[in-house]
Image (spheres, rainbow, N blue to C red):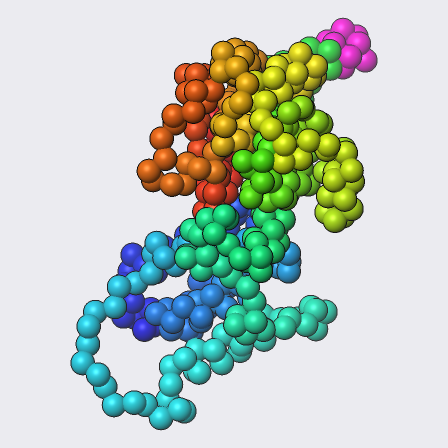
Amino acid sequence: MTIANTDQPFLANLLHFPRLLRRAGLSISLEQTMDFARALELIDLGVRDQVYHAARGLLVKRKEDFPLFDRLFDRFWRLHAPAREAQPQKTPLAPRHEEKQRGALSLAMLMAQRARQSDPEVDLADRANSYSPSEAFQQKAFSAMTPEELEAVKKLIRAMRWQVSQRQTRRRVLDRHGRYLALRRALRDASKHGGVPLRLSWQSRKIKARPLVVLADISGSMERYARLLLQFAYSVTQGITTVESFVFATRLTRITPYLRIKDIDVALAELAGTVIDWSGGTRIGESLQTFNRVWSRRVLRRGAIILIISDGWERGDAQTLRMAVRYLQHRCYRLNWLNPLLGNPAYQVRVGGLSAAMPFIDDFLPIHNLQSLEALSEHLAALR
């Protein structure tokens, strides 16, 4: 299926795929996009592997971007794949007439024509040797995964890129299109020319990412998810500079310094000797009260976003949890409660402590599989 007989909406969607990659953080130039458009004329658009290799070979420069590209391509192909009409079976073509072989050769020729002698060699590896999670794997609950699958999930979480919404600060920076006059700069320029300002400078509000605060439950009821949550907190801390992370069971422990260690194995080993209430009882309200009293003034400034990760099984006083969550909501920009049990369609909030806190939770979201993590990433980036 070439461009001549391809469904036009599908072709238009393919040309929008580079824009999707840019929004996800990949650096893609206009020249790469034009090369990708020309490559679509040389391949069979109905063959998934040909479109995949064309897009990855022409749009991705760095090896570390491959896992992110694979996830976006899988999602894009499921949403925009062309519908094939039922046709009568035809006589098989000889191998030398197969469209798949001709398309792959044409793509290689296109890349060879665009190459320069100074360009590094590119290995066009078969996609069968690369790992890309299927739809079933993305939707599979963490609690139902095998140890091998959990190890694969940890690598994918580590490779995820996180971005939080931005805010306007009070600080101003020079901007030729700004709306505020840089008065000090204008006066300084006027003092050099006899009190007459010959040049005006303008400013705009500085844009910065909002701080993110992670409060993760590592009590006994969360034991199945605790280590994956630490991988999640580590991935977020490595990708965003303004992150503060805490864990709690019967007490609150700040783990931010450990998650800034580049080696994840060293970081987790250090944490194992620091957190003394791992898989213990649950005192969510008292732990959040400690956070409010000791840490809130330091880390909840500048419109922070809070992520509380817990199943809500509170063994302490429900009223204490209610007041602590109420205080947090008033101090932050957005309060998100992530519950791994929410992935079960039959789940209902019946726990006394969590029920009392629900009126003060801005977003109540699941965190039970890879798909929920991707949805969380999009949610954080889309906040106003």
Across the whole image, how many numbered discs are drawn on residues? Answer: 0
Depicted 7 relative to depicted 338: above or below? below
Work out whether residue 296 can be spotted.
no
Q: Is residue 56 left or right of residue 345?
A: right
Residue at 56% over, 42% down? 225
The segment highlighted magenta reads 187-196
Q: Residue 248: where, in percent of width, then height?
A: 64, 28
In the rendered image, which quarter is residue 119 located in?
A: bottom right
Quarter of the image with the N terminus in it: bottom left
Observer able to see residue 107: yes
Which of the pair 32/278 is nearer the observer? Answer: 278
Q: Looking at the picture, how far across and down is residue 195, in whole percent? A: 76, 6
* Residue 213, x across and y down, in percent: 61, 27
Farthest residue, direction right:
192
Which quadrant of the view contains residue 302?
top right
Residue in the foreground of this view, choosing between 255 and 183: 255
Compared to residue 124, the image places residue 261 above or below, namely above
User: Is 201 located above or below residue 309 in the figure?
Assistant: above
104 falls in the magenta region: no
Residue nearer the viewer, 228 or 71: 228
Q: Which of the two residues, 136 or 150, is positioned nearer the viewer here?
A: 150
In magenta stretch: residue 190: yes
Residue displayed at 30% across by 63% down: 82
Q: Give the left or right position of residue 77, taking residue 370 as reference.
A: left
Q: At x 67% / y 12%, what residue is drawn?
A: 293
Res. 42 image quadrant: bottom left
Q: Residue at x 38, y 85 (%)?
A: 98
Q: Position of residue 132 (x, y in %)?
A: 51, 61
